[in-house]
Image: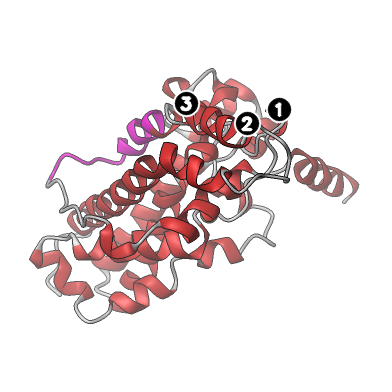
């Protein structure tokens, strides 16, 4: 018991990212993911988009289970960078040890698990589960497109930029993103595999230093006291990246829905 308490308190001290994208961003991604589907898969979601959208933030409400928070991020620098993140949890534990594995985050494996859960729902032809598992999948794929969810300095603590996490993923999205201005990108048809999240991780990670640099330039890192110019400056620098990541997350969730449907035997709705 002591050990478990100690592990939990160390875990809390080490800190984890908060709710990525806020509710608005996750709703946008969930909605886009089902709207870009090919017709035969999209039929499973016909008239049910609202249900997929409604549950898109559910995984952020499961955080009282201590196994849940690490499922939303991965500090890929701990592995030496995103291209060194192993493909299996066993290899990851071999590389950094079980305790660090827990603290370092498990986002790409969580996405994989979620695809398998969705595939099983398709195989069972259980529409209720298909809708919910899709919703949860869109959440974790969304988190994988937040640059600060891929680095240890996820909230700017090491660089005097505390709060940058919510400024990027909630502050900018709430203030500036007009959902109707985003493109619904159709699925890419057949190029996505269970290993694709590792490629996406590299791409998302590559944006993280620019997020920090632009936040610094817009507010010059002065804690929470920011001048009125901060928000428009930060949006000017990061707006196209925020919108691009939301669009890509929607499209890639769609790609994984198609993959899960194929894994589940391509059932007719
Ligand atoms: Zn999350």
How many discs mark residues in the rendered view? Answer: 3
Q: Which residues are magenta?
A: 190-203
Measured along the vertical axis of the image, is residue 187 above or below residue 132? above
Which x, y percent locates residue 43? Answer: 14, 73
Q: Residue at x 77, y 46 (%)?
A: 12
Q: Considering depth in this image, is 31 or 266 the residue closer to the camera?
A: 31
In the visual, does 14 lie left or right of 215? right
Counting residues from the start of the chain, the first of labels 1 and 2 encountered is: 2
In three-dimensional space, the C-alpha distance between marks 2 and 3, rounded to whole angstroms, equals 14 Å
Callout 3: few (<14), some (14-19), or many (20+) C-alpha neighbours within 10 Å? many
Q: Residue at x 47, y 48 (%)?
A: 143
Callout 2: few (<14), some (14-19), or many (20+) C-alpha neighbours within 10 Å? many
Q: How is the image coloured?
A: secondary structure
Instruction: Find residue 152 and name its label.
Output: 2
Counting residues from the start of the chain, the first of labels 3 and 1 encountered is: 3
Is the CB of mark 1 within 8 Å of ligand 1? no
In three-dimensional space, the C-alpha distance between marks 1 and 2, rounded to whole angstroms, equals 9 Å
Residue indicated by mark 3: 85
Which x, y percent locates residue 247? Answer: 29, 50
Which x, y percent locates residue 245? Answer: 36, 45
In three-dimensional space, the C-alpha distance between marks 3 and 1, rounded to whole angstroms, equals 22 Å
Q: Are marks 1 and 2 in contact (CB under 8 Å)?
A: yes
Q: Nearer the viewer, mark 2 or mark 3?
A: 2
Counting residues from the start of the chain, the first of labels 2 and 3 encountered is: 3
Give SS at disc 2: loop
Q: Considering depth in this image, is 68 or 55 the residue closer to the camera?
A: 55
Residue indicated by mark 1: 158
Measured along the vertical axis of the image, is residue 206 above or below residue 68? above
Measured along the vertical axis of the image, is residue 98 above or below residue 78? below
Q: Residue at x 58, y 29 (%)?
A: 93
Q: Nearer the viewer, mark 1 or mark 2?
A: 1
């Amino acid at each position: 018991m002591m050990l478990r308490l100690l592990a939990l308190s160390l875990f809390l001290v080490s800190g984890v990212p908060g709710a990525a994208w806020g509710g608005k961003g996750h709703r946008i991604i969930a909605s886009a993911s089902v709207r870009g589907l090919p017709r035969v898969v999209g039929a499973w979601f016909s008239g049910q988009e609202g249900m997929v959208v409604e549950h898109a933030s559910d995984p952020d409400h499961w955080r009282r289970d201590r196994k849940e928070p690490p499922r939303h991020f991965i500090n890929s620098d701990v592995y030496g960078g995103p291209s060194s993140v192993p493909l299996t949890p066993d290899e990851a534990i071999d590389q950094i040890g079980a305790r660090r594995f827990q603290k370092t985050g498990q986002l790409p494996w969580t996405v994989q698990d979620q695809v398998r859960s969705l595939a099983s729902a398709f195989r069972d032809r259980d529409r209720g589960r298909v809708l919910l598992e899709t919703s949860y999948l869109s959440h974790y794929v969304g988190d994988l497109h937040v640059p600060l969810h891929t680095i240890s300095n996820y909230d700017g603590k090491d660089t005097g930029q505390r709060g940058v996490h919510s400024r990027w993923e909630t502050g900018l999205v709430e203030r500036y993103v007009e959902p109707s201005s985003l493109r619904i990108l159709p699925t890419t048809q057949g190029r996505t595999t269970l290993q694709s999240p590792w490629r996406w991780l590299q791409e998302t990670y590559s944006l993280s230093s620019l997020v920090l640099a632009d936040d610094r330039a817009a507010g010059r890192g002065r804690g929470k006291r920011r001048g009125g110019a901060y928000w428009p400056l930060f949006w000017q620098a990061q707006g196209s990246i925020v919108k691009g990541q939301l669009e890509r997350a929607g499209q890639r969730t769609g790609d994984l829905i198609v993959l899960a449907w194929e894994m589940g035997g391509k059932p007719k709705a």
